[in-house]
Amino acid sequence: MSRTTSTTINDLRRLAEQATNLARAIRAAGDRLRRTDDEPTRRAGFRLDEAVSAADRVTGELITTADYLTRIANRGTCAADWGLCPEHGNTLAGSGGRSWCQRIGCRRRWDHDRAGLPCTEPAAYQVRDTAGGETLLCTGHANDARQRLIGARLTPITTGRKR
Ligand SMILES: [Zn+2]
Ligand SMILES: [Zn+2]
């Protein structure tokens, strides 16, 4: 992991903690207002509920960003910058930060945007395109390349480890 990335991840996690504390402090202030006997004072506190939600959203965005940066830093040895279903390939759909394989019967789901993040699978093939460019790809991405890159040559790579 690069120093910039690890520093940023730490910063984001620290900021998320601050946002959580901020939400807690605002909630406490709102609770105090709700306990007063004066009706206009109680009513004036309604915006604080909105402020708590905003701080909670900030926490969520910061944590998700730190999580994505961690996933990118720990990417697999496959060179593809997007994920797929390890069994079915280019079949992912996603929404609201979640993703799943659309193939009937495949129950794979992920709690993040797998298609929008680098592949986490180990490289299994060396793929050479007709222009001579070489990349290391996992089985799924190699199959995808075989269908999309006319004339691509796929060579299985050995990891040096016997299975
Ligand atoms: Zn699948
Ligand atoms: Zn891959």
Image (spheres, helix red, strand yellow):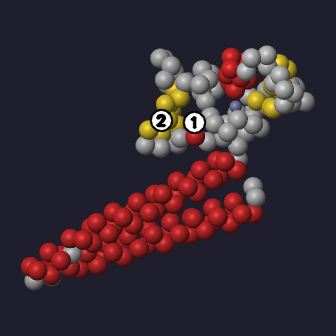
SS at circle 1: helix
* Horizontal side, residue 100 vs residue 143: left or right: left
- Neighbourhood count class around disc 2 (C-alpha, 10 Å): few under 14, some 14–19, many 20 upward: some
Q: Amino acid at mark 2?
A: Gly
Q: Are marks 1 and 2 in contact (CB under 8 Å)?
A: yes
Alpha carbon of mark 1 to alpha carbon of mark 2: how far?
8 Å
As drawn, 151 above or below 134? above
Q: Nearer the viewer, residue 95 or 76?
A: 95
Measured as percent of width and height from the top left, residue 22 is found at: 41, 73
As drawn, 118 above or below 17? above
* Horizontal side, residue 110 vs residue 158: left or right: left
Residue at the location (64% across, 64% down)? 8
- Neighbourhood count class around disc 1 (C-alpha, 10 Å): few under 14, some 14–19, many 20 upward: many
Q: Amino acid at mark 1?
A: Ala
Residue 94 image label: 2
Residue at the location (58% across, 40% down)? 116
Measured as percent of width and height from the top left, residue 104 is found at: 47, 17
- Give the labeled residue for mark 1: 115
Measured as percent of width and height from the top left, residue 28 is found at: 30, 76
Q: Quadrant of the N terminus?
A: bottom right
Q: Nearer the viewer, residue 37 or 104?
A: 104
Measured as percent of width and height from the top left, residue 11 is found at: 61, 68
SS at circle 2: strand
- The residue lying furthest to the front in this view is 131
Task: Determine if residue 133 is in view.
Answer: yes
As drawn, 103 above or below 18? above
| Precedes in sequence: disc 1 or disc 2 | 2
Task: Determine if residue 37 is in view.
Answer: no
Residue at the location (73% across, 21% down)? 149
Residue at the location (44% across, 38% down)? 95
Q: Quadrant of residue 14?
A: bottom right
Q: Quadrant of residue 49?
A: bottom left
